[in-house]
């Protein structure tokens, strides 16, 4: 499908890119090198070029490459309950590329369905972003929770996410973004956002605000032509305009890059390794239990001692329930050896390059040519090597 993607001041810069930067539109040779800060006419203190530490982008410094599938549903996450096998099953899955960002708010949408059963001891199936936050929210409402899961962090799919605040990334198609959907999405996003601000400044920096640069060869109001299999996604971030730092356009001399169009943005990031460890520790400290168990059939839910079960199996729900509304959207991330001095994110629009300064490594994300509907989780090392070389060319 041929799509047009705009990137205006109001969009979540990396979020928009992560759902739309598929095509590599220029070779490594096209990428321009960095410039040292230029002397300029009087600039405001905010606009002056900030010193940036170069990223040591060589492929031998890649310490990890992971591939995973986002659990995308055209109609958005499934949050509803049903009676089956003598139990109340609350389904809570299908958060696309927004699972970490929306998790707390989404858990609060699922909560009333759980509380309505009046059960004080519940089961949560799944220990990813959605299972862990659902369990924590239930605990905070006085429930005892046992998590059953095939995998726990760091083996869960959630562990391989990029780690950005991207609450509208592949969350539904434009067609399904009805006013009712958008209102509920906004409520979830605001609830999550509020929770995340309470996790700032903690040991291990589970959540941080970071600056970043988005670079573009063409003006930002000129749409990128995307030739991929992805549907049209809505830009819901406009609804959160009041609670996000604005990105600002920088003129030559106000930034260190030899690229014509540059914007500086500020975005919330998640250090997923320490964040999911924090979630696990909090869950266990409040009496939660984790049981390793794989379900091959939902009928096995009937064997659990709990009568209320929250199904947070993410992409796993496709096989477990035969739910083909879940479409895999493949994503590959790679980590370079951590560089604590690299404190900025970077994205080169239309060049298939997104970089996030995580504590556990400088994360380099790149899209493949056919990621939508692709469930193949084989690592394509050449894809990450190419992204690292594109990054290196910026620092040549
Ligand atoms: C490359 C990539 C980048 C991403 N970047 C971001 C980002 O920057 N920001 C953001 O907000 N989101 C991002 N996402 C999306 C986010 O990671 C997902 O939406 C989120 O991980 C979904 O969480 P989950 O808990 O539903 O699923 P999972 O993490 O897959 O957890 C599912 C759990 O259920 C268990 N399970 C599954 N099936 C069974 C079974 N049959 N029996 C027992 N247990 C089972 C699993 O073992 C696991 O514990 C990204 C995703 C990808 C792939």
Image (cartoon, rainbow, N blue to C red):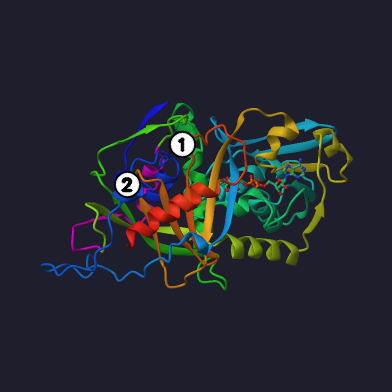
Query: In the rendered view, does 289 fall on the left or right side of 177?
Result: right
The residue where tag 2 is placed is: 10
Query: In the rendered view, does 213 fall on the left or right side of 19?
Result: left
Q: Secondary structure at mark 1?
A: helix
Expressed as whole percent of the image width and height from the top left, the position of residue 116 reads 72, 41
Query: Magenta segment range?
Result: 235-255
Mark 2 lies within 8 Å of ligand 1 (Cβ measured): no
Task: State which quadrant residue 33 falls in.
Answer: bottom left
Relative to residue 139, is residue 184 depicted above or below? Answer: above
- Asked whether the viewer can see residue 266, the reply is no
Nearest the viewer among 102 and 258 is: 258
Q: Residues within 10 Å of mark 1 (few under 14, many from 20)?
A: some
Structural distance between the alpha carbons of marks 2 and 1:
17 Å
- Asked whether the viewer can see residue 33, the reply is yes
Task: State which quadrant residue 225 falls in.
Answer: top left
Residue at 44 percent across and 55 percent down: it is 388
Residue at 38 percent across and 53 percent down: it is 390
The residue where tag 1 is placed is: 182
Foreground: disc 2 or disc 1: 2
The quarter of the image holding the N terminus is top left
Relative to residue 3, is residue 134 depicted above or below? Answer: below
Of labels 2 and 1, earlier in sequence is: 2
Relative to residue 387, is residue 212 depicted above or below? Answer: below
């Amino acid at each position: 499908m041929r799509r047009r993607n705009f990137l205006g001041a109001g969009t979540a810069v990396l979020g928009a890119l992560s759902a739309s930067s598929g095509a590599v539109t220029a070779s490594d040779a096209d990428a321009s090198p960095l410039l040292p800060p230029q002397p300029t006419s009087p600039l405001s203190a905010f606009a002056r070029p900030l010193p940036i530490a170069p990223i040591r982008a060589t492929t031998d410094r890649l310490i990890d490459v992971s591939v995973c599938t986002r659990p995308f549903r055209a109609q958005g996450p499934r949050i509803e309950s049903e009676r089956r096998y003598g139990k109340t099953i609350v389904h809570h899955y299908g958060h696309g590329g927004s699972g970490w960002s929306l998790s707390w708010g989404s858990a609060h949408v699922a909560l009333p369905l759980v509380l309505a059963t009046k059960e004080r001891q519940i089961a949560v199936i799944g220990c990813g972003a959605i299972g862990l936050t659902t369990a924590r929210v239930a605990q905070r409402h006085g429930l005892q929770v046992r998590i059953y899961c095939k995998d726990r962090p760091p083996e869960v799919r959630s562990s391989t996410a990029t780690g950005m605040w991207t609450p509208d990334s592949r969350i539904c198609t434009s067609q399904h973004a009805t006013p009712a959907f958008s209102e509920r999405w906004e409520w979830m996003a605001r609830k999550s956002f509020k929770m995340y601000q309470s996790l700032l400044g903690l040991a291990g920096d589970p959540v941080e605000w970071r600056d970043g640069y988005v670079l573009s060869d063409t003006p930002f109001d000129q749409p990128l032509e995307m030739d991929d299999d992805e549907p049209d996604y809505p830009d819901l971030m406009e609804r959160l305009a009041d609670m996000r730092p604005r990105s600002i356009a920088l003129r030559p001399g106000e930034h260190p890059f030899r690229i014509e169009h540059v914007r500086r943005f500020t975005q919330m990031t998640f250090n997923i390794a320490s964040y999911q460890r924090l979630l696990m520790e909090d869950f266990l400290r409040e009496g939660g239990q984790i049981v390793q168990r794989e379900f091959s059939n939902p009928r096995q839910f009937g064997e659990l001692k709990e009568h209320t079960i929250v199904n947070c199996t993410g992409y796993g729900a496709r096989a477990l329930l035969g739910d083909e509304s879940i479409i895999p959207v493949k994503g590959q991330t790679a980590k370079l050896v951590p560089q604590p001095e690299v404190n900025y994110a970077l994205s080169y629009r239309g060049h298939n390059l997104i970089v996030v300064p995580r504590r556990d490594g400088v994360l380099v994300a790149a899209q493949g040519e056919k990621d939508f509907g692709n469930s193949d989780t084989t690592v394509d090392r050449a894809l990450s090597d190419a992204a690292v070389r594109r990054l290196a060319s910026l620092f040549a």
